[in-house]
Image (spheres, helix red, strand yellow):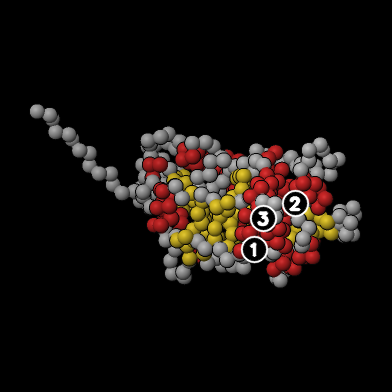
C-alpha cells in the first residue's frame, strides 16, 4: 500500500506590493526581471527609457512594484526560487505620452513595457502597476492608454483583456528593410504590367500625404556609384539628411501647413529627443535643392521622425517605428516621401535593423495608400486601447 502523500498547507496570500516611481538605481533589477522573461538582456533599451524619463518627466511615467511589508526577508534578489527580501523590486511598468504623432490631437498614454518576477505573477502586481499608471495618465490629461502586442502572445492578450483593453481603431503596418523601398517599387511595377497603373497610383497616394545606436548615415552626396538605384538618386536629389537643431523652424512650418495647427512645442520635444539620444531616434529632413532657403541646401520640403529600439512586449529583434511623416504640400509630385523612406531604410540597414513599422488611423486612406505602395503590409501586431474614466482604471 502506498503511503499517503503529505500535503503542504497553502501558502498565505502575499500582501499588496508597494508602488513607487522607478529610480535610476533600479536599472539592474529591471534589467534582470526583463532578461529572465525575454531570455536575453535589453539593458541598453531600458537604460535609454529611464534616461528619457529623467529628461522629459512630463512625457514619461515609470513605476516600480516592491515586495510588500509581509514578505519574508530570508531570500535574496536574483536567485531563482527564493522570495525577494521585503522592499525588493518585483515588477515594473513603463509608459510614455503621445501627443502629436501623425497629427494626433488628443494626448494618450502608450504602454511600452511591463515585467513581473516569475514567482510573483498572478498576485495582481500588474494590475496595481496599471492602476498607478492610469491615475498618472488622468492627472496629465490622457484619456486613453494605447499599446500593441503580437496576436500570438496569448498570455499578454489575456492580461490586456483583464485590464479592459479592446481592439484599437488604429492598424499597424510594417515593411522589411532588406531590399528597401526600391525593391517594393520594382515588384509593384511588375505587378502593374505595361500600363504602369500601380506606379501611377503610388505617385497619386504620395501627393495625398497629409501627416504629419550609433548611427552610420549613408552619404547620398557622393558621386553616383555604379548600379545606384533610382531611389538612392531620389534621396540624393532631395537632399535628405539627419535632422539638426536648426531645422526646428522649417519643420514646424511644414507641420503647420499640413495640419493647420501650431505644434511647435511637440516638434521641439521630438527634435530634442532625436539630437540628445541618437540611439533611440532615427529622424530625417529633406530639402529641395535649388529653391533658395538654406546655404546650399534649398528649401525644407519634408521630414520623418522615427525611433529604433529593442522594444516592448515581446519584440524579438530591433525594429524601427515611424512616428510622423510630413511633406510640404508645395512640394507634391516630387517623391519627397519616398526619398525620406529610402534614406531611412539605408540607415537602418547599416544598423542591422530588419523591419520598420508604423501605426495608422483606420480612416486615413491616403496615408495607408502611401505606405502600401512603399511595400508595407499588415503587421502580426495588433493595437489595443483602454479608455480611462474619471472613477477608476
Observer-nearest of 204 and 86: 204
For the N terminus, the quadrant is: top left
Mark 2 is surrounded, within 10 Å at the Cα level, by few (under 14), some (14 to 19) or many (20 or more) other residues, namely many
Identify the disc placed on residue 198: 3
The picture quadrant where one finds residue 369 is bottom right
Image height of 251 relative to 261, above or below: above
Observer-nearest of 277 and 321: 321
Mark 3 or mark 1, which has the lower sequence index? Answer: 3
Mark 1 or mark 2, which has the lower sequence index? Answer: 2
Image height of 245 relative to 314, above or below: below
The local secondary structure at tag 2 comes to helix
The picture quadrant where one finds residue 180 is top right
Question: Are the residues tagged 2 and 3 within 8 Å (C-beta)?
Answer: no
The local secondary structure at tag 3 comes to helix
Give the CA separation, mark 3 to mark 1.
Answer: 15 Å
Give the CA separation, mark 2 to mark 3.
Answer: 18 Å
Observer-nearest of 315 and 139: 315
What percent of the width, then of the height, locates residue 2? 12, 29
The residue singled out by tag 1 in the image is 366
The residue singled out by tag 2 in the image is 339
Mark 3 is surrounded, within 10 Å at the Cα level, by few (under 14), some (14 to 19) or many (20 or more) other residues, namely some
Please give left or right for residue 374 compared with residue 315 in the image: right
The picture quadrant where one finds residue 265 is bottom right
Image height of 302 relative to 119, above or below: below
Q: Residue at x 50, y 54 (%)?
A: 382
Amino acid at each position: 500500500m502506498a503511503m499517503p502523500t503529505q500535503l503542504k498547507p497553502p501558502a498565505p496570500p502575499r500582501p499588496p506590493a508597494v508602488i513607487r516611481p522607478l529610480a535610476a538605481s533600479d536599472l539592474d533589477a529591471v534589467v534582470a526581471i526583463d532578461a529572465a522573461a525575454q531570455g536575453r538582456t535589453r539593458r541598453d533599451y531600458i537604460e535609454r527609457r529611464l534616461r528619457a524619463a529623467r529628461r522629459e518627466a512630463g512625457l514619461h511615467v515609470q513605476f516600480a512594484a516592491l515586495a510588500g511589508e509581509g514578505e519574508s526577508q530570508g531570500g535574496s534578489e536574483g536567485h531563482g526560487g527564493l522570495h525577494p527580501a521585503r522592499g525588493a523590486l518585483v515588477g515594473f511598468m513603463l509608459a510614455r505620452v503621445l501627443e502629436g504623432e501623425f497629427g494626433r490631437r488628443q494626448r494618450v498614454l502608450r504602454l511600452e513595457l511591463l515585467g513581473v518576477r516569475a514567482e510573483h505573477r498572478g498576485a495582481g502586481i500588474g494590475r496595481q502597476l496599471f492602476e498607478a499608471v492610469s491615475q498618472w495618465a488622468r492627472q496629465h490629461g490622457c484619456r486613453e492608454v494605447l499599446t500593441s502586442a503580437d496576436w500570438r502572445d496569448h498570455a499578454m492578450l489575456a492580461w490586456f483583456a483583464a485590464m479592459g483593453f479592446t481592439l484599437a481603431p488604429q492598424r499597424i503596418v510594417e515593411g522589411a528593410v532588406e531590399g528597401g523601398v526600391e525593391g517594393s517599387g520594382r515588384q509593384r511595377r511588375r505587378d502593374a504590367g505595361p500600363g504602369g497603373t500601380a506606379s501611377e497610383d503610388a505617385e497619386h497616394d504620395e501627393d495625398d500625404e497629409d501627416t504629419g545606436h550609433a548611427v552610420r548615415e549613408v552619404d547620398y552626396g557622393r558621386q553616383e556609384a555604379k548600379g545606384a538605384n533610382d531611389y538612392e538618386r531620389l534621396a540624393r536629389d532631395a537632399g535628405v539628411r539627419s535632422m539638426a537643431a536648426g531645422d526646428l523652424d522649417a519643420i514646424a512650418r511644414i507641420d503647420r501647413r499640413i495640419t493647420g495647427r501650431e505644434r511647435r512645442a511637440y516638434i521641439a520635444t521630438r527634435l530634442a529627443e532625436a539630437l540628445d539620444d541618437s540611439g533611440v531616434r532615427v529622424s530625417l529632413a529633406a530639402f529641395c535643392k535649388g529653391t533658395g532657403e538654406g546655404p546650399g541646401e534649398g528649401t525644407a520640403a519634408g521630414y520623418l521622425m522615427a525611433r529604433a529600439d529593442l522594444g516592448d512586449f515581446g519584440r524579438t529583434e530591433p525594429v524601427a517605428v515611424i512616428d510622423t511623416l510630413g511633406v510640404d504640400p508645395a512640394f507634391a509630385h516630387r517623391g519627397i516621401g519616398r526619398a525620406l523612406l529610402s534614406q531611412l531604410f539605408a540607415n537602418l540597414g547599416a544598423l542591422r535593423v530588419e523591419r520598420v513599422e508604423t501605426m495608422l488611423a483606420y480612416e486615413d486612406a491616403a496615408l495607408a495608400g502611401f505606405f502600401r505602395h512603399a511595400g508595407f503590409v499588415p503587421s502580426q501586431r495588433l493595437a489595443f486601447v483602454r479608455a480611462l474614466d474619471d472613477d477608476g482604471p
